[in-house]
Amino acid sequence: MADLPASIYIDEDVGQDDSTASGSESAPYKTLLHAFLQHAPEDGRQYLMRKSQTDLPGDNVDAAAKLEWKPAAKSAMKKASSLFEQRKKKAAKEQELAIREKQEFEKRQQVLEEAKKVVIKEDPSLPKPVRIRLDVTDPAVVKLGSPESDTPGTRVRVLGRVHRLRPQKDVIFLTLSDGYGYLQCILSGDMVKTYDAMTLTLETSMAINGEMRAVPPKQHAPNNRELHADFFTVIGRAAGDKEAISTRVAPDAEAQTLYDNRHLVLRGETSSKVMKVRAATLRAFRQAFDENRLLEVSPPSMVQTQVEGGSTLFGFNYYGENAYLTQSSQLYLETCLPSLGDVFCVCPSFRAEKSLTRRHLSEYMHIEAELDFVTFGDLLDHIEEVICRVLKLTMADPAIAGYINELNPEFTLPSRPFKRMKYAEAIEWLREHNIANEEGQPHQFGDDIAEAAERKMTDMINQPIFLTHFPAEIKAFYMKKDAEDRRVTESVDVLMPGVGEIVGGSMRMDDWEELMNAYKSQGMDPSPYYWYTDQRK
């Protein structure tokens, strides 16, 4: 048996707490605790320490003194011993846990190996299952069995992904999702003994056959029904452990993590409800526009002109020419009016705005409309009518209304008529209520009212507002000036309590010379806009 070292060396300046050190005088450790961990304290062993590169305190100190090895101080030994004992206890617990986990793993593997031998087969004597989506509740298609009735429920076949999973000893409760609805399914008997059942993970794709039954009294499930399975197959097994969806997009995950995993976040109930409400809102817009005889058109997304300012353009090379992703389709919509009448579009718009607020997106779906032969008053009436009609149509769908109430329980339909307030009146209101601008100063005519001040005003007034007649200097070049006050334009922002601006609109310059002067005042070359300028000739 090799002799154990009687002396262990620790140099706090040049020692190393890694595999390059051995605790010898030529290869010392750096800390006393590491020395304890490598060479546990025992009778006759001493720990010698020094700081070979640290000058000793005092004057006229022998330079060689710092190279001397001295026994570790009692206080240092006591502290290191305490930490050493803590480490020993922790290591013992970890070893005990590792042994237990290994035993459980081996036991689990044995159970799974046995489970592979369990094979379930579909009973050919049962009625042929009816294939349904998970939201089908029509009694003519799906009848529910119940404990009070001897009549069995309809045998159905459903396909979906495991949205929730609750395994118990002799039964597995799972909620299946197919994008249309949710269905609680119950596996029992030999089915829970199969390998596929024992290794089920969230988002696993499955096909399940079984009888539809009403949920027992005082219990709850989607649509108050559940599927008692008699046969199932796994179509695609989803990842588990570290790659499981519940790990990738945990409820407490940071926002950036959720953004990076948006494709998985969309599988959650909240995100899917938002998308369904969005789709219903788009349907309502199209219906409202159709009722008002607006025709849908599809303007280009690749353009050579700006609409909302050159600083927010996404540019790219288009076969040797400068081109941009559209900021807005409104100018193109104007070209359709003479031949198509009033028109609208639902198209993406792009803004290269370097902002991280929730109201600034690089890409968003833009609903725009253009009306022919209207006054500014007509425009405001039309906007109010469309907003209220869209909301009414959206809320008329019970399922969508339910989603909205879940997502925003405080939502109420806006009351009519909307309040009409000119920009100059808003400036005065902000001054009277001591709401400062972004520089902390009282608002002045000509200020571009910031979102925070605008929202505060809207929330305090607490009703929808048509904010109109903005100064020409803070609006787009093509907006028509008010005949009675040439400082301002016939423009409007629709402000909604709790939200802020939801719609922007304006009348357009219809005079060719005035439009040319507007190009000039903005320092814009009118030649790329020839197709728009032609509308004024």
Image: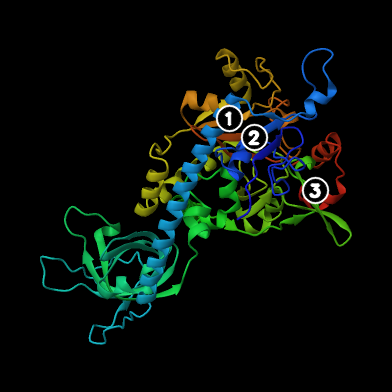
Q: Earlier in the sequence, mark 2 or mark 1?
A: 2
Instruction: State the residue in front, 157 or 343.
Output: 157
Q: Amino acid at mark 3?
A: Thr
Disc 1 crowd rating (10 Å Cα; few below 14, some 14-19, many 20+) is some
Splitting the image into 4 quarters, where does residue 301 fall? bottom right
Q: Which residue is mark 3?
A: 533
Q: Which residue is tagged 1? A: 77
Q: Quadrant of the N terminus?
A: bottom right
Crowdedness of circle 3 by 10 Å Cα count: few (<14), some, many (20+)? some
Q: Amino acid at mark 1?
A: Met
Give the distance between the C-alpha atoms of the residues marked 3 and 2, in whole angstroms.
Answer: 91 Å
Question: What residue is rendered at 18% in x and 69% in y?
Answer: 145
Vertical relation: 57 (above or below) 534: above
Q: CA distance from mark 2 to mark 1?
A: 9 Å
x 36%, y 54%: residue: 399
Which residue type carries mark 2? Tyr
Describe residue 230's horizontal placement relative to residue 236 as left or right: left
Residue 64 position within the rendered picture, expressed as x and y whole percent measured from the top left: 83, 25
User: Which label lies toward us, 3 or 2?
Assistant: 2
Q: Secondary structure at mark 2?
A: strand
- Name above or below for residue 452 compared with residue 285: above
Secondary element under disc 3, as helix, strand or loop, is helix
Which residue is located at x 50 percent, y 38 percent? 85
Which residue was labeled with disc 2?
47
Q: Quadrant of residue 102?
A: bottom left
Q: Do the CB atoms of the residues marked 2 and 1 lie less than 8 Å apart?
A: yes
Q: Position of residue 404 (x, y in %)?
A: 41, 46
